[in-house]
Image (tube, helix red, strand yellow):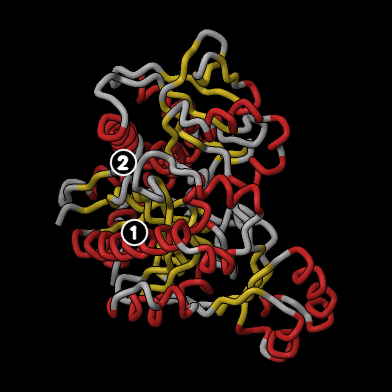
Amino acid sequence: MFNDEYSLELYKIVREDEDMYYRDFVDFISKTKVSKAIYHGEPIPMTYQGLFYNKKNRSDFVYISNILMSMTDKITKEFVENPEYRKIFQLDPAIEELVLHDPGYDVPVPICRYDVFYDGVNYMLCELNTDGSSAMNEDNTLGQLLLQTKAMQKFMEKHDVENVDMFTPWVWETADMYKKYVSDKKPNVAIVDNLEVGTPNEFDEFKRVYEENGFNCEIIDIRDLEYKNGKLCHGDYVIDLVYRRIVTLELLKIKDQIKPFLDAYMDNAFFMVGSFRSQLMHSKLIFEIFRDEQTQALLNNEEKKFIDEHVPFTKKIEERDAYEIIMNKDKYIFKPIDGYASLGIYVGSEMREEELQEKLPEFIRTGYVFQEYYDMNKCEFLEFEEKSPVLNKFTQVVGLFIYNKHFVAPYTRIGKDNVVSGARKYYTAPNLFINE
C-alpha cells in the first residue's frame, strides 16, 4: 500500500537502536519548535516521518490535478458567458462583479491546493482550496529538517528521497505568466494580504525566493496600497505583479478599506495571480454544482465518471433536508459554504440528535452544505509512545498543490479524529518523494 511499505522499512531501522533514534527524535522536535514552521503562533506538530510517495502515486496526483483543471476551465468559461449558469453559484453581487472582470489571462485558478483522501488505490475529494492556498512553508521547512534525521539518513542509503520545493516553481510560474501575458521585463512583485490574518513566515520565504531569483518583492497589507497615476503603489514602490494571498471572504469583510486596490484591479493597472475567478472552485457548493445538469452538459464522459466515483454527495442545506439530515446524521459532515481552514465544521456522528436539531436553523441561516462522510483506509505512520517506536494508523488528507495547471507536490496532514485539520489535533507529514 502507498506509504506503508516505506513506513515499515523506516520502523525497522528505528527498532535497530531505539534509544539512539528516540534521542534523535527529541532533537528533531526541538529543532521544529524553533524553526519557521509556525501556524497561528504555535510550532507545527510532527511525528518522526513524512508522507512517502513514489512515481506511481505521483502519476495519480497528476491525473487528478489534470482532470480537475480541465473541469475548472469549462465551468469558469460557462460562468462568464452564461448569466443563467451564474445563478447556481449564489455569489454575492460584489464578488460576481470581480469574478466577471477579465484578469488578462486564461488560467482561472493559477494556484490551488485540492485536498483528497488518498490511500494509494482509492481516493475521494475532500475540498478545494484556491484563494490564499497555504502551508508550503511548513512542508518544506519540516521536510528539510526531517531529511537530516538519523533515521532518514539511514533510509536514504537505499532510496533516492526528495522533499519537493514548493517555492521556486511558483516564482517561475508567475514570472512565466507575466512574460506571456504582459511583458518580457522582470516585474516588481507584491505579496498582498490582510497581514493581521496572514502567514508572515510563509510570505517571508516567498519574498526571499523571489529576490534570490532576481525579482524585486515586497510584502504589503492590502489596506496600505495606493492607486495613483494609473499604477498600484506602496509608497514609491510601483507594483507590476500581485500574488494575492487574501481569501475572498476576508476581502469582503474589509472591502470599504481597499478601494484603491479594487479600482486598480478593475482598471487592469496590475497583473494579479490569482484572479477572483478562483472563487468559483473555492466555494463548498462546487461539489453540488459538479452534479448540476448544466455542468454535466459541459463535461466529457471521463469527467462525469470522475465525479460519480470521486466526489462525495454534497448539497446546500435547506429546510426540506431536515428530516434526511436528522435521520441519517452519521452519514454526513456539515461545512460552511464560504469557510476555510476547517473552521465551523461539524461531524454528524459526533453530534447528539438534539444538538443537531438546535444547529440546523443556524446552518440554514448562515449557509452550510451537508456532505457524505468518507471513511477512508488509513495509513501507517511512525511515532514514539513512551520512548518506543510504534506504527499507528492515521487518516491522511493529501493536498495537491497545482501551479499554473501543473502538479507540484502534495501537502499532507494526518490525524486520528474524524476531521484532520489545524482546528483539531493533527500532524504534518512533509512530502517525501521516492524516485522509484
Q: Is residue 42 left or right of residue 409?
A: right
Residue at left 65%, top 26%?
Answer: 223
Please state the total of marks drawn on the protein image. 2
Q: Is residue 414 left or right of residue 332?
A: left
Q: Is residue 265 left or right of residue 147?
A: right
Residue at left 29%, top 43%?
Answer: 164
Where's residue 75, x and y in %?
A: 42, 63
Closer to the chain start, of discs 1 and 2, is 1
Q: Which quadrant would the C terminus be assigned to in this image?
A: bottom left
Q: Which mark is residue 147?
A: 2
Give how far apart the Cα atoms at labels 1 and 2 are.
32 Å
Residue at left 32%, top 67%?
Answer: 4
Q: Amino acid at mark 2?
A: Leu
Q: Nearer the viewer, residue 122 or 126?
A: 126
Quadrant of residue 343 within the rendered picture: bottom right
Where's residue 289, x and y in %?
A: 51, 72
Q: Nearer the viewer, residue 240 or 151?
A: 240
Q: Residues within 10 Å of mark 1 (few under 14, many from 20)?
A: many
Where's residue 248, x and y in %?
A: 60, 46
Q: Is residue 252 above or below residue 203?
A: below
Q: Secondary structure at mark 2?
A: helix
Q: Which mark is residue 69?
A: 1
Q: Nearer the viewer, residue 436 or 153?
A: 436
Quadrant of residue 189 within the rendered picture: top left
Note whether residue 121 is visible.
yes
Where's residue 217, x and y in %?
A: 42, 20
